[in-house]
Structure formats: C-alpha cells, structure tokens
Image (cartoon, grey):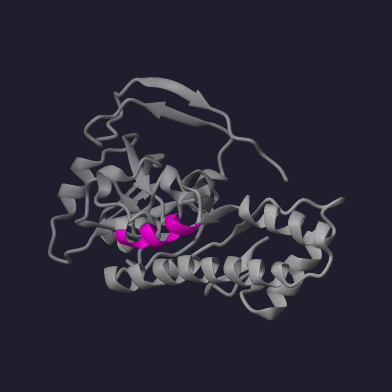
C-alpha cells in the first residue's frame, strides 16, 4: 500500500482515509495480502540543502511509523477475535519500503534509523533509491553524487560538425538519446570533464556545445574535438536517458575518465515494454 508522506503525487493519505483503506485490505486477507507499506520521497529532489533533506527523511520515517501504530490501534479495537489476531499478525509482518536517491543517505543516517528500527525489524526495511544505479546531473545538484566520477551512466556521442563563426561544435546525440528533461544547473546535458563548455541547445538528433567564456579561443574547442572524435555526455536524468537505448556497454573505469579506448567488459540488455 503506497502512502503519501509529502510528495503528493500518488499514495493514500496518512490519516483516517488511508487507515480505512488499509483496514479494508486487511479484512479481505483471504483474497488480498497486505505485504507492506511503500513511500517515495520525490519532494527530496526539490532541494540540495542537507538540513532540509534530513527533515524530509525524518518526516517520511515518522509518518510511516505513526501510520503503523494507528493501524495497529484500529486492529486492536476489532471485536472479531479471529480477525483481530490475524490483522495484528499481518501488521507486525509488514515490509516497509522508503526513500529516494536524494534522501538515501539521510534515511540510512544512524540517528534517523534508530527510532525506526526500534519498532520495525531491520530485515523488514527496504530502501529504494532508483537513480542511485547510474546517478546524473540532477544528483550532482542534490549532493547524492559527490562528484562527476560518481556518475556511471553516460551517453557516448561523436563530433559531427564545426561552426567556427558560432564558436560551436555539433554532437550526434540529441533528445532521442538524452531526452529534454531539465536539471537545476541549466544546460541540456554536460560534457564529461569539461565544465568550461556549455551544452546550450538540443534538438531531436543533435546537441550544440560552445565555450562558456565568450572570450575563449574558438580554435581551442575545434582542436580539442576534431570531427569524428568521441565524447561522453552526462544526462540531466539518467533514468529517462537509459530508456532510450536497447543495450548498455559496461567498461571497467576506475578513474572516471570514460576515455574512448577503454575496453568494454560487459553488455547489459534492459527489459523493455510495460
């Protein structure tokens, strides 16, 4: 059963309305099994302030705990002894699934988890940071990813155009490879290892890149990135970007350089479709 602990996208409210739904599920235990409670701290994406992220995580955990306590109290008042016993047994065995990538390290902070673990068996607590697999520019902003080298999901692209009059190079990866999802840092994406360059415009198939400094040498960017050279790009949102591809090439990159000559050690084929 999904609970709404502040994101307000989906989930039942953590009040009498949500408790009524949970009790209905418990009453139908012969046909529907209530396995656990789930929350998603999507509102943690809205800040990179550590104190606010800590507050969001604490609120998420405390709201779930209170919901469980209130649900247990409701079940205790049931007059049917057989149902009451079964409901309390199910409540005690609930799996709890919490979190999001920005709130991950705040959820597992010792101070935040201690009260949680007093009431819930540690084995029943699940943390689900989906974007944690790859990270992206959004997570660099939230602070979940401590640096560019932490971002494992990159898009390889090739330089296909030089435009000296506009101080611009063109790459062959556009919205169909990166999507047009935004991040708080602006720019349509970022070029690995080159904070001095601005990925300033994207269309369906291409991205345009230029120096951030208006006085920077035009020759420098053209020399650094000759036609046909391969670059890697950091997507704003790797979940959406990953969905654009039917396979991922894995490299054993210990220093985060993502250089063109690194050996591909594995190939992953994602599950597609709904």
Q: In this view, does 120 lie to the left or right of 196?
A: right
Residue 261 to residue 1: above or below: above
Residue 34's spot in the image, x, y percent?
A: 72, 54
| Quadrant occupied by the N terminus | bottom right
Q: Which of 185 and 202 is in front in this view?
A: 185
Q: Nearer the viewer, residue 86 or 63?
A: 86
Residue 220's spot in the image, x, y percent?
A: 15, 48
Residue 88 to residue 172: above or below: below
Query: Magenta span has 118?
Result: yes
Residue 122's spot in the image, x, y percent?
A: 46, 47
Residue at 82%, 70% (x, y): give it.
79
Q: Nearer the viewer, residue 19 or 48?
A: 19
Q: How many labels sit on residues?
A: 0
Residue 72's spot in the image, x, y percent?
A: 65, 66
Residue 11 seen from this side: no
Q: In this view, does 51 lie to the left or right of 95?
A: left
Query: Magenta span has 236?
Result: no
- Kindly report the secondary structure that dominates the magenta region of the rendered protein: helix
Residue at 29%, 44% (x, y): give it.
150
Q: Is residue 231 left or right of residue 123?
A: left
Q: In the picture, residue 270 is in which quadrant?
A: top right
Q: Is residue 149 left or right of residue 59?
A: left
Q: What stretch is highlighted in magenta?
A: 111-119
Query: Which residue appears farthest toward the bottom when viewing the image?
Result: 16
Residue at 73%, 46% (x, y): give it.
274
Residue 165 seen from this side: yes
Q: Nearer the viewer, residue 130 or 61?
A: 61
């Amino acid at each position: 059963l999904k609970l709404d602990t502040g994101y307000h996208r989906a989930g039942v409210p953590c009040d009498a309305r949500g408790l009524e739904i949970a009790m209905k599920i418990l009453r139908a235990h012969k046909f529907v099994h209530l396995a656990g409670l789930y929350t998603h701290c999507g509102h943690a994406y809205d800040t990179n302030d550590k104190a606010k992220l800590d507050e969001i995580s604490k609120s998420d955990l405390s709201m779930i705990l209170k919901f469980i306590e209130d649900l247990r109290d409701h079940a205790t008042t049931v007059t049917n002894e057989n149902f009451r016993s079964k409901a309390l047994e199910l409540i005690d065995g609930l799996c709890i699934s919490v979190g999001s990538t920005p709130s991950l390290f705040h959820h597992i902070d010792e101070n935040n988890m201690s009260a949680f673990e007093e009431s819930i068996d540690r084995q029943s607590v699940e943390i689900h940071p989906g974007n944690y697999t790859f990270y992206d520019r959004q997570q660099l902003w939230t602070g979940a990813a401590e640096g560019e080298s932490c971002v494992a999901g990159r898009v390889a692209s090739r330089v296909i155009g030089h435009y000296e009059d506009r101080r611009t190079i063109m790459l062959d990866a556009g919205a169909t490879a990166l999507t047009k999802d935004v991040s708080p840092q602006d720019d349509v994406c970022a070029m690995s290892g080159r904070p001095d360059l601005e990925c300033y415009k994207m269309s369906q198939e291409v991205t345009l890149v230029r120096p951030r400094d208006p006085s920077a040498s035009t020759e420098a960017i053209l020399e650094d990135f000759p036609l046909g050279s391969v670059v890697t790009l950091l997507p704003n949102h790797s979940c959406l970007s990953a969905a654009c591809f039917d396979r991922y090439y894995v490299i054993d990159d210990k220093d985060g350089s993502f250089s063109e000559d690194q050996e591909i050690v594995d190939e992953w084929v994602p599950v597609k479709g709904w």
